[in-house]
Amino acid sequence: MVTGCAAEESPPSGGQQVVLALAEDADQAGAEAQYDMLRDGDVTRSEYAQALDQMAACWLELGVQMSEPYVNPVDGIQFMYDVSAVGPTAPDVEGSQEECRTANLSFVEQAFVGSTEPVMDPRLQSAVVQCVGERGLRVTGDEVNLRELVDAVGEAEAGEVTGCLDSVIREVFPDIGPYGVSY
């Protein structure tokens, strides 16, 4: 007697569920390129960068230029950039910029951020840990992101942690442009 079993398909993980839901949203919004990037339930940094490049090209057609993007050292996830006008801009440039963002980036960015664990740049993490310690707060030094640092000192001291971050980030990254802080 021969017996066998078929491999059961496991349900998508939490991160995959987020990505698949956003794929459906992208499909419904007519954002085909984003749908194609998300429909497999996974999104890579390369796909995120590609979507960002597509948005930047759309913005450039509006007379808006994006600086060279860089990964936010606070979370190691989001791309950060500056924006400037180059020549005359479209009459409703802000509305048009948002249309470019929705058509080219927003679903992929939400999927990448929602399915990627934040990890602070090690140099920045070390400087924040030192600052927090100098303020008399205790952390282990093993915390890898802002949420873990806040959890270590307690929510009541969150302002001390973000204050340290703000005070040391330009020492560690002197040429940094905008950066995002969330936990």
Image (cartoon, grey):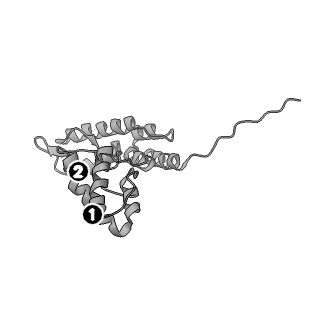
Locate residue 59: give its quadrant. Answer: top left
154 vs 123: above or below: below
On the image, the x and y values in percent for residue 110 come to 39, 49
| Label 1: which secondary element | loop
- Is residue 179 visible to us here? yes
- At label 2, counting other C-alpha atoms closer than 10 Å, the crowd grade (few under 14, some 14-19, many 20 or more) is many
The single residue placed furthest to the left in the displayed view is: 87
Who's the residue at 29% across and 41% down the image?
55
State the residue in front, 19 or 114: 114
Which badge, 2 or 1, comes first in the chain's sequence? 1
Kind of residue sitting beneath label 1: Arg
Who's the residue at 50% across and 48% down the image?
15
State the residue in front, 155 or 114: 155
Horizontal side of 62 relative to 79 (left or right) equals: left
Which residue is disc 2 drawn over?
169
Which residue is disc 1 drawn over?
135
State the residue in front, 51 or 173: 173
On the image, the x and y values in percent for residue 16 come to 52, 45
Q: Nearer the viewer, mark 2 or mark 1?
A: 1
Horizontal side of 101 relative to 3 (left or right) equals: left
- Counting the numbered discs, the total is 2
- Is residue 178 visible to us here? no
Whole-number angstrom distance, CA of label 2 to CA of label 1: 17 Å
121 vs 149: above or below: above
Horizontal side of 24 relative to 166 (left or right) equals: right
